[in-house]
C-alpha cells in the first residue's frame, strides 16, 4: 500500500508549491515542446503552433476562472481575499468549460492563419494527451479526483490534511490510484499518436484516434473514481465525465470518416508528396 503521496511539492517559508500545479505546468511545457516538434514534421511553422497553444491556454485559464467567479460571486463578495486562491481550484466542470473555450480560440486562430484544421489537430493530439497525463499525475499527488475505496496492494492512502482541505480527499482510507490509471492510459495514447503521425493515411486521422482513445480511457477509468461532485446521469449509471467521454468517441469517429481526395484538407507532407509525384508522371 502506498502512502507517500504529497499535495505539496515543496515550500519556501509560508509559500507552498502545490504538486498539482507544478505537474500541470510541467505538462504544459512538455506539450509545447512536443507540439513544436510535430509542427515541423507536419509542414507547419513552429511559431504558428506556439502562438496557437499560448492563446488557447490563456483563453482556457481565463474562461474557467471567470466561470468560477460567476458561480460563487456571493461568497467572493463576502470574502474578497478568496480571489487569490482561484488558481488552485480544479473541477471537471471548470476543465470542460476551459477546454471548450481553448478549442474555439485555437480554431479561430488556425483559420486566421490559414492552417488546415485537420492537420493542426493531428499536430496537437499527442501533446494534449501528454499534458493530460502529467495533470493526472499531479492530481494523484494532490488527492484531486480521488478514487473509490480499495483493498488492492497498490492502493494509496492520503494522510496530509492539505489533501482533504484542498481536494476533499478522505484521509486514512485506502483508495484506488485512479488518477495514476488515467495518467498511464493517456501517456500510452500519447506515444501511439506520436508513432502514427508520420504514417497517417490522411489529415485528421491522428486527431480522430486521439479523441476516441482519450474517450475510451476516460470512460473506463471513471468506474474506479469517486463520483462525488462530478454529476450523475441516468440515475447514477454514468457520471458527467463519462458523458463527455462518449462525445469524444463520437467526435473521433466523425474525424476518422473516409474522405475523397477533394474533401481531404491540404497541408500534410504525405498529400503534398502524392500530388508532386502525380504531376511528374
Image (spheres, helix red, strand yellow):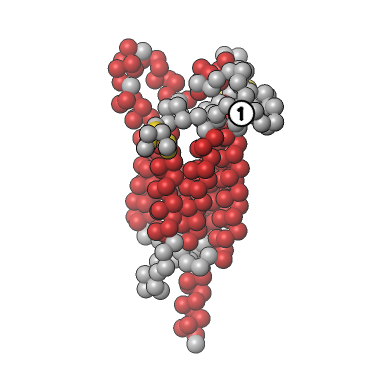
- Please give the name of the residue rendered at 60% of the width and 31% of the height, measured from the top-left corner: 176
Q: Residue at image x 51%, y 81%?
A: 277
Q: Is residue 56 visible?
A: no
Image mark count: 1
Residue 81: percent from the left, percent from the top? 40, 15
Classify 10 Å Cα crowding around label 1: few (below 14), some (14-19), many (20 and above): some
**Callout 1 secondary element:** loop
- Judged from this view, the residue extending furthest toward the bottom is 281
Q: Along the horizontal axis of the image, is 232 left or right of 70?
A: right
Q: Give x and y (percent) for residue 107.
A: 37, 51
Identify the image quadrant of residue 11: top right
Task: List x then y, in percent, for residue 24.
Answer: 54, 35
42 in relation to 172, above or below: below
Is residue 48 shown left or right of residue 12?
Answer: left
50 relative to 8, above or below: below
Quadrant assignment for the N terminus? top right
Q: Is residue 113 above or below residue 202?
A: above
- Can I make out residue 244 in this image? yes
Residue situated in front as seen by the camera: 204 or 158? 158
Residue picked out by circle 1: 150
Q: Residue at x 58, y 26 (%)?
A: 149
User: As drawn, is 131 to the left or to the right of 59?
Assistant: right
Q: How far across and down, in percent of the image, does residue 127 sit?
A: 53, 48
Amino acid at each position: 500500500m502506498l502512502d507517500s503521496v504529497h499535495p505539496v511539492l515543496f515550500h519556501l517559508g509560508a509559500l507552498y508549491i502545490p504538486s498539482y500545479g507544478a505537474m500541470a505546468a510541467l505538462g504544459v511545457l512538455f506539450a509545447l515542446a512536443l507540439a513544436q516538434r510535430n509542427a515541423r514534421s507536419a509542414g507547419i511553422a513552429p511559431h504558428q503552433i506556439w502562438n496557437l497553444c499560448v492563446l488557447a491556454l490563456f483563453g482556457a485559464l481565463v474562461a474557467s476562472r471567470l466561470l468560477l467567479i460567476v458561480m460563487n460571486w456571493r461568497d467572493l463578495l463576502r470574502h474578497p481575499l478568496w480571489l487569490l486562491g482561484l488558481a488552485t481550484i480544479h473541477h471537471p466542470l471548470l476543465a470542460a468549460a476551459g477546454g471548450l473555450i481553448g478549442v474555439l480560440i485555437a480554431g479561430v486562430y488556425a483559420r486566421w492563419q490559414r492552417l488546415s484544421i485537420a492537420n493542426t489537430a493531428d499536430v496537437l493530439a499527442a501533446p494534449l494527451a501528454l499534458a493530460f497525463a502529467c495533470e493526472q499525475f499531479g492530481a494523484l499527488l494532490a488527492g484531486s479526483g480521488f478514487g473509490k475505496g480499495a483493498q488492492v496492494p497498490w492502493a494509496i492512502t492520503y494522510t496530509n490534511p492539505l489533501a482533504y482541505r484542498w481536494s476533499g480527499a478522505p484521509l486514512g482510507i485506502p483508495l484506488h490510484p485512479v488518477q495514476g490509471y488515467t495518467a498511464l492510459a493517456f501517456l500510452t495514447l500519447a506515444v501511439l499518436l506520436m508513432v502514427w503521425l508520420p504514417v497517417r493515411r490522411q489529415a485528421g486521422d491522428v486527431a480522430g484516434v486521439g479523441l476516441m482513445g482519450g474517450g475510451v480511457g476516460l470512460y473506463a477509468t471513471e468506474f474506479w473514481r469517486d463520483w462525488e461532485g462530478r454529476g450523475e446521469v441516468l440515475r447514477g449509471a454514468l457520471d458527467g465525465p463519462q458523458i463527455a467521454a462518449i462525445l469524444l468517441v463520437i467526435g473521433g469517429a466523425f474525424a476518422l470518416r473516409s474522405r475523397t481526395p477533394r474533401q481531404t484538407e491540404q497541408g500534410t507532407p504525405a498529400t503534398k508528396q502524392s500530388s508532386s509525384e502525380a504531376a511528374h508522371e
